[in-house]
Amino acid sequence: MTTASDRYLVRPGRPCDAAELAALQASVQLSASTDGTPDAGIAAWVEDLLDGHPSVRHDDFVVAEEIATGRLVASLVGLRQDWSLAGVRLPVAQIELVGTLPAHRGNRLTERLFTTLHQRYTTDGVPVQMIEGIPYFYRRLGYDYALANDGAPTVSATALPANGQDQPTGGLTMRPATVTDADALADLDRSLADSTTLTCPRDAATWRYEIAGRRPTATARRTVAVLARDTHVLGYLVHGVRLSATGELIVVAAACPPNQWPQAAPAMHTYLGRTGRQHEASQGRPFTGVRPILDPRHPLILLTPPGAPQRPRGWYVRTGDPCDLLARLRPVLRERWRAANLHWPEATLTIDTYGHAARLTFTDGHLTAVTAVRGAVSPPTDPATHAAIPPTALLQLALGHRSLPDVLNLWPDCLLRDRRTEHFLTAAFPTVPVHVWPRN
């Protein structure tokens, strides 16, 4: 009897796979909207990923090869990047382009591809993986909705400044970005990475790629505009290269120094209105409004004209080791407790995740180390355990998706030893705005 494991070889991608991977993904992605016709924008995106993308090498693809024919029948790719939370570097892999040819579905190839990828990231020390995708599906592979995505209101085109009615902007202007802006944009990202938000800062090479490195037809291509005063770059706005099927201009990122937002927001609104109307004229499609894929707490949104509320969505997130994630975030936890003037009175604080545990070590009340230790047989009744928190709940706390009161309401098996522990961990895990534009 031949099994699926006998039929397929799961392996890293190779340079010689490029054309076949582009054809495979073009045929399986967005097929419902293209009536089965291969999508040229997807093919161009895959070609981009395999031709100079700053976050991808050929072996970041994982493929399933049919042994009998040598044909590639399924694949996915992990885009490595560094995110930042309060200045702490957090290695992340963004999973994209998960697809299997129809004739080979039902053989658990997606599960095998993910298993291979997860093992690689464990070895390489990449603690977080994230993906957008099919509702519920990736829960089966160990992912959970643990990051907020979207939720900002859609603003009607009629609410934006009309042509010739630019709002006062304090001398700020918007213009298309050029590769010569890359260093300034990287400096801005670097400065904003120290904020309390979760960000995905780009270096100069990545900015050059975003501005001029993608193929014109690639699905992942975006337009980058810079906010400037005279020749000094102060911020940026990133949006779709054309109107959506419903006539909306999609905004995926916006940034500038916090004290500049009162002037920056009107300049960006004026630019978006003007750009949307230019697309309307060139595409022959009505410009209906601006659709920001941003956190509702984003400064641009707080200063945007009223719009139609949107239900927040979520990104799937996974970590193979919640204790390692806490260890990486040790400087953030230490600073939060320092800012709250809190000192832990014991030598250690143990957080058990029902299988593994993190031992937080303190010196003079200040956090000095986070160490993985063996979990208790029964964490809620173990006298050495201060908190028993399910791993998915701890992941959401660590990334700021939920606060401790939220978790206590939603997880009956999140249990704390006493009120002092609750107070201390509440200060450690506030909710965090997500200002991430992933490097796809």
Image: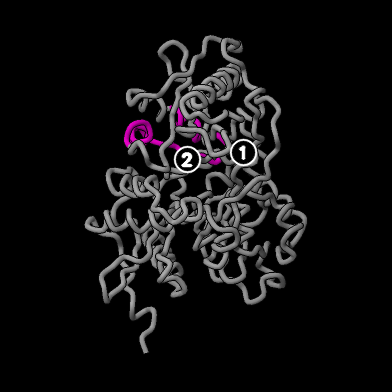
Give yes or no for residue 6 being in the magenta stretch. Answer: no
Front residue (pair 382, 409): 409
How far across and down, in percent of the image, does residue 78 sit? 40, 54
Q: Is residue 260 visible?
A: no
Q: Which residue is mark 2?
A: 200
> What colour scheme does the image use?
one colour
- Which corner quadrant holds the N terminus? bottom left
Front residue (pair 54, 161): 161
Q: Which residue is mark 1?
A: 295
Can you name the residue that lies furthest to the bottom here? 1
Q: Are marks 2 and 1 in contact (CB under 8 Å)?
A: no
Q: Is residue 195 above or below residue 131?
A: above
Q: Residue at x 39, y 67 (%)?
A: 116
- Which corner quadrant holds the C terminus? top left
Q: Secondary structure at mark 2?
A: loop
User: Which of the two discs, 2 and 1, labels the residue nearer the N terminus?
Assistant: 2
Q: Residue at x 45, y 23 (%)?
A: 226
Q: Which residues are magenta?
A: 188-213
Q: Is residue 30 above or below residue 355?
A: above
Name which quarter of the figure residue 430 lies in.
top right
How far across and down, in percent of the image, does residue 280 sit? 52, 26
Q: CA distance from mark 2 to mark 1?
A: 14 Å
Q: Residue type at mark 1? A: Asp
